[in-house]
Image: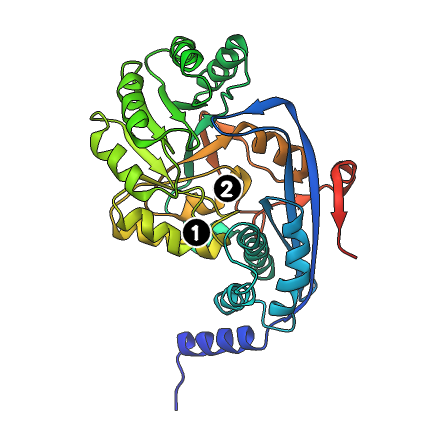
């Protein structure tokens, strides 16, 4: 009997994966990093950002993943998720993801549990990439070499001069779109939008994000006022939980303005409601919330099936990998806080060049390594 080389190769691969390393450890930590100045949006104000980091070890390699969440997500990862994945094959991410989702049934999946699963799932993909010696982008299969990015910040706490300087800086660096926050002060917000438009000129797209500050009728009024300044993107004009309200705003928004949401989709169920509810023009996904890379892939498939464009929310060092592979992807968010924080804590954090981000395929997994000496001053909690 003659066995083809291809058949032999497939058999060897299956055997190697089946007999591959099992997860022997899960660890977690939380780091609280002050912002460079006070920040606020339409519904919240803050002075620090908490990064929850999960490490998963197998086969002598340690994968890391993260979320932006409460430090309690780190505790939950250790106390609940560790038991769900330890001793199981590291390559079987789908089975591990299902086990984690099942483990939090009585805890409540949305919110803290979703961010803990997200950080852990992201670590599992990083681990798999490291074990195989390939980047996550190459593990998934690239759809593009560079991901367009838009500069994002423009907090309502900024002075007009601070707002103009930040947005103008991104435009000067080659970003073709920038985003600012609105929703806190109706009088100030219209003035700030005018300041922003003057700062970036007419050739740069101007996006706005209300973080769910309005009710539908008010949001529709704002959509038409914003259109007068050439705003083409209105993010979370109402709460993401109000699918009917989002749909109403979308139906009555001026032509050419995209109504967008999805950053608070805690998994495929919430993503499906937004997509099937015809509530949005662009789906935004956040792999630090939507149950990690695995949940992001399900959401991207939903977007593709419904012919919706996809954009990633925050966490650029993570999403550069995923948006390189996501076929319906149009751009990623270059969020001021997270760009600063990821560059401060990680080796391998990407850079935006001429308004786009490319993944370094020579770095396996997510391509990130925590700089312990730089991170330790911000440490709030670490598992033993």
Q: How is the image coloured?
A: rainbow
Mark closest to the chain's N terminus, 2 or 1: 1
Q: What residue sits 35% from the left and 31% below the top?
A: 215
Q: Secondary structure at mark 1?
A: helix
Nearer-the-camera pick, 276 or 29: 276
Q: What residue sits 50% from the left and 26% below the top?
A: 41
Q: Position of residue 84 (x, y in %)?
A: 60, 69
Q: Position of residue 65 (x, y in %)?
A: 60, 51
Q: Which residue is mark 2?
A: 359
Placement of the N terminus among the 4 image quadrants: bottom left
The reply to whether residue 307 is visible in this rendering is yes
> CB of mark 2 within 8 Å of CB of mark 1?
no
Measured along the vertical axis of the image, is residue 247 above or below residue 21?
A: above
Indicate the quadrant where residue 148 lies: top left
| Residues at marks 2 and 1, CA–CA distance in whole angstroms | 18 Å
The reply to whether residue 280 is visible in this rendering is no
Q: What residue sits 50% from the left and 53% below the top?
A: 110
Indicate the quadrant where residue 281 lies: top left
Nearer-the-camera pick, 205 or 368: 205
Q: Which residue is mark 1?
A: 296
Crowd around label 2: few <14 · some 14–19 · many ≥20 (10 Å): many
Q: Is residue 344 left or right of residue 175?
A: right
Q: What residue sits 46% from the left and 74% below the top?
A: 9
Q: Position of residue 228 (x, y in %)?
A: 27, 14
Q: Position of residue 86 (x, y in %)?
A: 65, 69
Question: Which circle, 2 or 1, is nearer the viewer?
Answer: 1
């Amino acid at each position: 009997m003659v066995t083809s080389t291809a058949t032999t190769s497939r058999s060897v691969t299956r055997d190697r994966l089946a007999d591959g390393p099992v997860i022997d450890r899960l660890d977690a930590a939380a780091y609280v990093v002050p912002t460079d100045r006070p920040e606020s949006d339409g519904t919240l104000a803050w002075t620090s950002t908490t990064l929850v980091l999960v490490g998963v070890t197998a086969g002598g390699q340690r994968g890391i993943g993260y979320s932006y969440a409460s430090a309690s997500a780190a505790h939950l990862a250790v106390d609940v998720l560790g038991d769900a994945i330890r001793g199981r094959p590291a390559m079987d991410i789908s089975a591990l993801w299902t086990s984690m989702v099942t483990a939090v049934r009585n805890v409540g999946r949305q919110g803290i549990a979703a961010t803990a699963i997200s950080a852990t799932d992201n670590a599992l993909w990083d681990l798999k990439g490291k074990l195989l010696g390939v980047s996550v982008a190459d593990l998934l299969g690239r759809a593009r070499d560079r991901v367009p990015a838009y500069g994002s910040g423009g907090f309502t706490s900024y002075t007009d001069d601070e707002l103009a300087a930040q947005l103008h800086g991104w435009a000067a660096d080659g970003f073709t779109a920038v985003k600012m926050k609105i929703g806190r002060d109706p009088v100030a917000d219209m003035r700030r939008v005018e300041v922003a438009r003057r700062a970036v000129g007419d050739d740069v797209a101007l996006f706005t994000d209300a973080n769910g500050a309005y009710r539908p009728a008010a949001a529709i009024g704002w959509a038409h006022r914003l259109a007068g300044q050439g705003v083409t993107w209105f993010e979370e004009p109402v709460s993401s939980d109000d699918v009917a309200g989002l749909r109403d705003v979308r139906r009555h928004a001026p032509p050419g303005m995209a109504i967008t949401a999805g950053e608070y989709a805690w998994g495929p169920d919430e993503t499906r409601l937004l997509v099937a509810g015809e509530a949005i023009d662009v789906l935004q996904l956040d792999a630090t919330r939507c149950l990690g890379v695995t949940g992001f892939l399900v959401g991207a498939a939903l977007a593709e099936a419904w012919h919706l464009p996809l954009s990633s929310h925050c966490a650029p060092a993570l999403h550069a990998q995923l948006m390189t592979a996501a076929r319906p992807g149009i751009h990623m968010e270059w969020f001021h806080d997270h760009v600063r924080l990821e560059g401060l804590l990680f080796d391998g954090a990407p850079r935006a060049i001429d308004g786009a981000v490319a993944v370094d395929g020579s770095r396996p997994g997510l391509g990130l390594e925590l700089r312990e000496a730089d991170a330790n001053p911000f440490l709030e909690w670490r598992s033993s």
